[in-house]
Image (cartoon, rainbow, N blue to C red):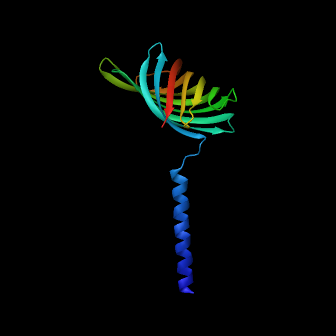
């Protein structure tokens, strides 16, 4: 009986280990991990980059989450975004989409030699085009308008709304 129980446990352990390795080593075809480059906000463009993940649902909708950083000598911006996308065309290889989301920002700026942080959160709307190559690699280009509500910061005495336009491109890897 003891030998049968040990054999059953070892078979269960091996099959569980195999199942777990399959879950974590494969990415579904409708999920893309990507690197991105961004320029914005207009009228003071700052170049930056980031990483993200996009998951499609039924080729009609997607959820997109990313982390990014843009920086110049006197200002650095850290951004976390989550967007819900609606595809406007049914072409799987070339799709136009629109979306809404929310973005949180932390900005570090230097003024007269003193550095200070400003934090904000706000809604965003976006429009873009996504292409999928025959090898299954995704790339996209989009323009987004963010309306950040600055909520706290040292050297920042009041709440204000700051609209900005950002251009973003990305490619899966």
Q: Indicate the position of residue 75 as horizontal and vertical percent values.
A: 38, 22
Left or right of 62, for residue 138: left
In the picture shown, does residue 14 fall above or below 114?
Answer: below
Left or right of 60, for residue 105: left
Seen at 55% across and 66% down, the residue is 15
Of residues 134 and 86, the one drawn nearer to the viewer in this rendering: 134
Q: Indicate the position of residue 6 as horizontal and vertical percent values.
A: 53, 79
Which quadrant of the view contains residue 72?
top left
The answer to whether residue 156 shows anywhere in this view is yes
In the picture shown, does residue 88 fall above or below 10?
Answer: above
Q: Indicate the position of residue 81 as horizontal and vertical percent values.
A: 53, 32
In the picture shown, does residue 161 fall above or below 16?
Answer: above
Of residues 94 and 163, the one drawn nearer to the viewer in this rendering: 94
In the picture shown, does residue 23 fall above or below 35?
Answer: below
Which quadrant of the view contains residue 146?
top right
Q: Indicate the position of residue 58 as horizontal and vertical percent values.
A: 69, 39
Seen at 60% across and 30% down, the residue is 101
The answer to whether residue 124 shows anywhere in this view is no
Seen at 70% across and 30% down, the residue is 90
Seen at 55% across and 27% down, the residue is 140
Of residues 159 and 45, the one drawn nearer to the viewer in this rendering: 45
In the rendered image, which quarter contains the N terminus?
bottom right
């Amino acid at each position: 009986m003891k030998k049968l129980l040990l054999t059953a446990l070892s078979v269960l352990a091996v099959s569980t280990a195999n199942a777990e390795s399959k879950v974590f080593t494969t990415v579904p075809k409708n999920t893309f991990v990507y690197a991105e480059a961004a320029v914005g906000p207009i009228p003071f463009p700052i170049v930056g980059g980031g990483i993200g993940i996009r998951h499609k649902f039924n080729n009609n909708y997607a959820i997109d989450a990313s982390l990014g950083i843009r920086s110049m000598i006197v200002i650095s911006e850290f951004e976390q975004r989550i967007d819900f996308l609606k595809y406007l065309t049914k072409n799987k290889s070339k799709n136009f989409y629109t979306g809404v989301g929310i973005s949180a920002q932390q900005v570090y700026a230097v003024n007269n030699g003193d550095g200070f942080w400003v934090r904000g959160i706000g809604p965003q709307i976006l429009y873009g085009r996504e292409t999928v190559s025959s090898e299954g690699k995704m790339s996209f280009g989009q323009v987004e308008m963010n309306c950040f509500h600055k909520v706290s910061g040292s050297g920042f005495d009041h709440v204000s709304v700051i609209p900005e336009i950002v251009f973003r491109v990305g490619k899966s890897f």
